[in-house]
Image: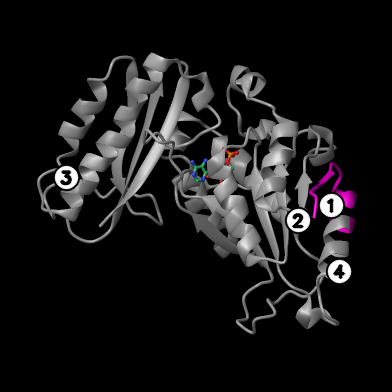
Amino acid sequence: MSIALVTTIAELKAATAALLEERAGAGAAESGTLGLVPTMGALHHGHAALARAAVEENSVVVATVFINPLQFGDPGDLARYPRTTEADLALLGEAGVDIMFAPSVEEMYPGGEPMVRVTGGTMGEIHEGASRPGHFDGALTVVSKLLHVGMPNTGLAAPDGSGRPAYRAYFGQKDAQQLALVRRMVADLNFPVDIVAVPIIRDADGLASSSRNRFLSAEERESALVLSRALELLKGRADAHEPLDIRSAEELVRSAPGVELDYLEVVDPDTLAVRAELCQDTPFTGQALAIIAAKVGPVRLIDNVLLG
Ligand code: AMP
């Protein structure tokens, strides 16, 4: 089956409904499940892992490619963001995705910027949100729209009798704060969709794969490896139930040339609240998430690792 490219919401709905019907038995109870994979394009093997997970678990899969102006604070960053539609279509087709939805800005925001937005509240103002004001409100607003326009019309419950929705959306653990916020949005606002998290995919040298990595020079890339090394250091200490001694990990990051550390924190994986009691001298127990953000040359990088 070759992948279809659609650019309007009407085409998306028609194409999804036709495929669901084609692949279903008779009646709504057998109408299958739909997997949605929201992206901003410039796809790499991290995105491919999301697409493959969705293809494995659903009868029809839609990937969206939309560079959402609402979530960019810096117009330069938006203008620079790589646009690689043909390659994206090929990667998604290879992964077995059925439909790529690549709408224009006008299609998504026909009246200009929306007056009403979804907000992440205080959870959207910490960590990434503190450095990128408005970013998560923009991201949640577009994810909300994409979840709505992608929602299948047929049968609300999955045909496996589990009572779960017949609709799943896939997000990467790479963007831990976005994932936590999307989970909260879906729970707090009763979206009929299951959120599925996909583990971080890394390049061979350990750097978390990202569409922005292509802007790193060879030297900057070498320096950037200190992010995953610092997280590995913390994971080693957590596994050994030693104190995390975050300060020494921060020192390690700051010692790499050209790396400007924004934050390195140990947080609750669901609420992203800082677990100050775990950060320094107390032996590590339980579960937490270590999150890091740094600027390396022109590129802002984020990474994280589950501890315990
Ligand atoms: P983006 O195109 O950067 O907005 O990312 C689209 C989706 O792909 C998000 O859910 C990301 O978390 C996920 N993603 C991006 N990079 C990776 C990666 N290296 N590993 C796993 N998921 C990723």
Q: Is residue 6 part of the magenta span, yes or no?
A: yes
**Callout 4: 10 Å neighbours few (<14), some, many (20+)?**
few
Residue 182 percent across, percent down from the top left: 55, 53
Ligand 1's quadrant is top right
Question: In this image, 1 relative to 88: left or right?
Answer: right
Quick check: marks 2 and 4 in contact, CB under 8 Å?
Answer: no
Tell me if I can see residue 74 in this picture.
Answer: yes
Name which of mark 3 and mark 2 comes first in the sequence. Answer: 2
The residue depicted at 70 percent of the width and 33 percent of the height is 87
Amino acid type, label 2: Gly
Q: CA distance from mark 3 to mark 4?
A: 54 Å
Q: CA distance from mark 1 to mark 4?
A: 15 Å
Check disc 1 and report the residue beneath it.
12
The residue depicted at 43 percent of the width and 40 percent of the height is 202
Q: CA distance from mark 1 to mark 3?
A: 48 Å
**Quadrant containing the C terminus in the rendered view:** bottom left
Q: Is residue 109 above or below residue 295?
A: below
Check disc 3 and report the residue beneath it.
244
Name which of mark 1 and mark 4 comes first in the sequence. Answer: 1
